[in-house]
Image (cartoon, rainbow, N blue to C red):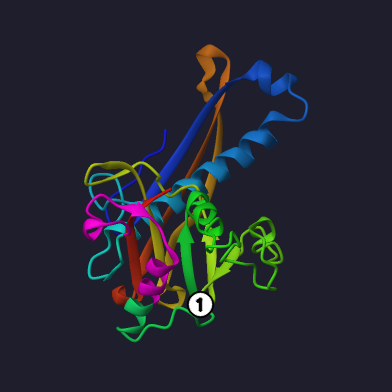
Amino acid sequence: MISGTLHLRVANSVYRQFSNELLADADPAWNQFITKTLLRDVALYQDAQYLEGAGTGNFITGFSAYGSTTTGPIPGTAGGTNGGTITLDNLQDAVYNLRAVNVEPQQGSGFFIMHPRTLNTLTKIKDTTGNYIVSNFQGYNAPAIFGGQLAGSNGPKAMILGVPVYLTSQIGIANTVGTSTDCSNIYVGDASKVIILERAGIELAFSDQVGFANDQSAWRAIGRSAVAVTQPTALEVIKGVRA
């Protein structure tokens, strides 16, 4: 079970119940495995909420639903009514939109956050002679190593227009824009204007009593946190991004 609470904070939990025989017989120890997976599941849910929480019901207000942000250029023809394939022109326009409100995304705290599908589309853009337009930051004109020199599993995976690119599959790729149902978002902005508010770290708890009648034990993980944008115009959302 994973759940959340309203708007300014997210209190989410993950609950798992297992047979005591499995716990006793597993090698390696099952409790170590479940501890890691519970922590991962809560962290992934928090990431999804920070970016795309709807701000209604049990969901916090994530980037996609935040008010007064800078409007991004929806890709595609006809004014982007139905979305479209992302282009480098769209990203250039996004950078300009932020600069127009005195935000500089090319400084050290700038970011693009996108689904891996989106980066894959961008790195396959070619010129009229078949050469890749987007090369890695050391100048090699091959997307297979694009961003490959950027160290750190949690760090940026690429640089586009001088802005670090962060990837997460927690961004949806089945959003509806007009008649298209395969759309995604790109988030652009200045991280110095974004604050993660952690009311409580992820807490793990174990009980060998809750499933006593069925010879089971249970684990629960709970986290309480929120995201806040101190200058909403420093955040831009590009919607309607198709593969």
At a point 23% along the width and 42% down the height, the residue shown is 179
Q: Residues within 10 Å of mark 1 (few under 14, many from 20)?
A: some
Q: In this view, does 35 lie to the left or right of 165?
A: right
Along the line of sight, the residue nearer the viewer: 202 or 58: 58
Q: Residue 207: in sight, yes or no?
A: yes
Q: Residue furthest right?
A: 27
- Image position of 117 with respect to 149: above or below: above
Q: Name the residue under label 1.
A: 109
Q: Where is residue 147 in the image (x, y as percent from the top left)?
A: 65, 64
Q: Where is residue 174 in the image (x, y as percent from the top left)?
A: 36, 41
Q: What stretch is highlighted in magenta?
A: 75-95
At a point 33% along the width and 76% down the height, the residue shown is 230
User: Disc 1 residue type?
Assistant: Ser
Along the line of sight, the residue nearer the viewer: 42 or 87: 87
Q: Is residue 84 magenta?
A: yes
Q: Where is residue 181 in the image (x, y as percent from the top left)?
A: 30, 40
Q: In this view, does 197 lie to the left or right of 138?
A: left
Query: Image quarter for residue 3?
Result: top left
Q: Where is residue 102 in the image (x, y as percent from the top left)?
A: 34, 87
Placement of the N terminus among the 4 image quadrants:
top left
Query: Image quarter for residue 191?
Result: bottom left
